[in-house]
Image (tube, helix red, strand yellow):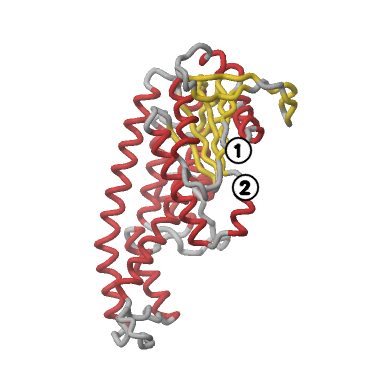
């Protein structure tokens, strides 16, 4: 273990240099703590313990985003993995998830939590490294004990917060969906919207990593606040774009206009384009599908920087609503849509 002396009077200790052997040991300790025990079982053994076939266990494991070792004798599963397989099987047995949908459900869960895990590991790793700074000279066993202590302190707090946010989202989603059909056949009339940052590709070449991260954080934070503040919800964010949905046409109009007014408001910030479309959409595992989604995306791509474009259905709902001004534009032919009716949505300052 080595450490460099601080330069120019900087009293901040240099990061601890961790040997490859110690790094593997620390990783093993973290894994055992996260998984609730060491790896004990092969593919065949874990399937037998969970009461499912090896083929079914493999399908679910891969669907959740994990690799399966082709060596049948490889020991890679824990007691926690067996419990998870039993839980999924019980949901199918009780009719909560249909047999033909269990793989899709596992995939949706894995994809949703994978991104969250990336952020959490970065957070936990940064904290551990910061706490270990200046530990040069300590023996490896002492460092491993320190990491175990930090893990025992951090993980329960993160897990508790995660469970709270999940329960809150379930409560919120239940409020929107009471009385609607189940996930497998859910078709609802919604307003779907997209907002994206104009010129994002060129910005990635101009801005440094820290400035780009700051821009994206401000974009996501402000847009989430606006959308959630008017009964909408974020479907997903992909880099420079946020996709959202809302039930009320008036709320949708307010979200779109406030996105333009309140998100990235500085003169040096890039502008946004926003597109909205209304109609029946397929709701599947939290995502939205259908021609309405395609229309909203095309309107966003057609919008000029700093403007909001909406489709004919939403324009009909907003026609005559106080506080809004609608201007019909010439229809356009875009990919997948022969005749795209488009209306500019603005505030009516005279109302």
Q: Residues within 10 Å of mark 1 (few under 14, many from 20)?
A: some
Q: Please tell me how many numbered marks the rendered image carries.
A: 2
Percent position (x, y) of residue 314?
55, 18
Callout 2 environment at 10 Å: few (<14), some (14 to 19), or many (20+)?
Answer: few
- Cα separation, mark 2 vs mark 1, equals 9 Å
Left or right position of 214 against 69:
left
Q: Which mark is residue 305?
A: 1
Task: Specify the quadrant that holds the N terminus.
Answer: bottom left
- In the image, 6 versus 127, the foreground residue is 6
In the depicted structure, whether residue 202 falls above or below residue 127: above
**144 sits left or right of 22 in the view:** left
Q: Residue at x 52, y 62 (%)?
A: 209
Up the image or down, 32 lies above or below 119; here it is: below
Q: Which residue is mark 2?
A: 199
Q: Which mark is residue 89?
A: none
| Residue 84 screen position, x and y as percent | 39, 47
């Amino acid at each position: 273990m080595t450490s460099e002396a601080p330069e120019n009077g900087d009293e901040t200790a240099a990061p601890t240099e961790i040997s490859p052997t110690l790094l593997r040991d620390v990783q093993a300790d973290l894994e055992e703590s996260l998984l609730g025990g060491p790896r004990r079982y092969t593919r065949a053994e874990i399937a037998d313990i969970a009461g499912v076939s090896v083929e079914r266990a493999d399908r679910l494991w891969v669907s959740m985003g994990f690799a399966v070792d082709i060596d049948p004798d490889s020991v890679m599963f824990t007691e926690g993995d067996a419990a998870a397989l039993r839980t999924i099987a019980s949901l199918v047995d009780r009719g909560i998830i249909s047999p033909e949908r269990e793989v899709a459900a596992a995939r949706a869960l894995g994809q949703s939590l994978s991104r969250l895990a990336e952020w959490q590991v970065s957070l936990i790793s940064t904290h551990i490294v910061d706490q270990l700074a200046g530990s040069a000279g300590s023996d490896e066993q002492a460092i491993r004990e320190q990491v175990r202590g930090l893990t025992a302190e951090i993980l329960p707090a993160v897990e508790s917060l995660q469970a709270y946010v999940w329960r809150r989202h379930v409560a919120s989603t239940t409020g929107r969906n009471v009385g609607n059909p189940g996930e497998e056949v859910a078709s609802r009339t919604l307003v779907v919207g997209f907002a994206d940052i104009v010129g994002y590709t060129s910005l990635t070449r101009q801005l440094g990593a820290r400035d780009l991260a700051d821009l994206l954080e401000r974009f996501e934070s402000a847009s989430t606040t606006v959308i959630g503040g008017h009964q909408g919800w974020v479907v997903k964010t992909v880099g420079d774009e946020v996709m959202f949905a809302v039930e009320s046409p008036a709320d949708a109009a307010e979200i779109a206009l406030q996105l333009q007014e309140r998100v990235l408001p500085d003169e040096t910030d890039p502008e946004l384009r926003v597109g909205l479309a209304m109609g029946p959409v397929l709701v599947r595992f939290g995502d939205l599908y259908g021609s309405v989604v395609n229309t909203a995306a095309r309107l966003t791509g057609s919008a000029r920087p700093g403007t909001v474009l909406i489709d004919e259905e939403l324009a009909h709902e907003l026609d005559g609503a106080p506080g809004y001004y609608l201007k019909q534009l010439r229809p356009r032919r875009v990919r997948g849509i022969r005749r795209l009716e488009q209306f500019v949505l603005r505030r009516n300052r005279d109302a």
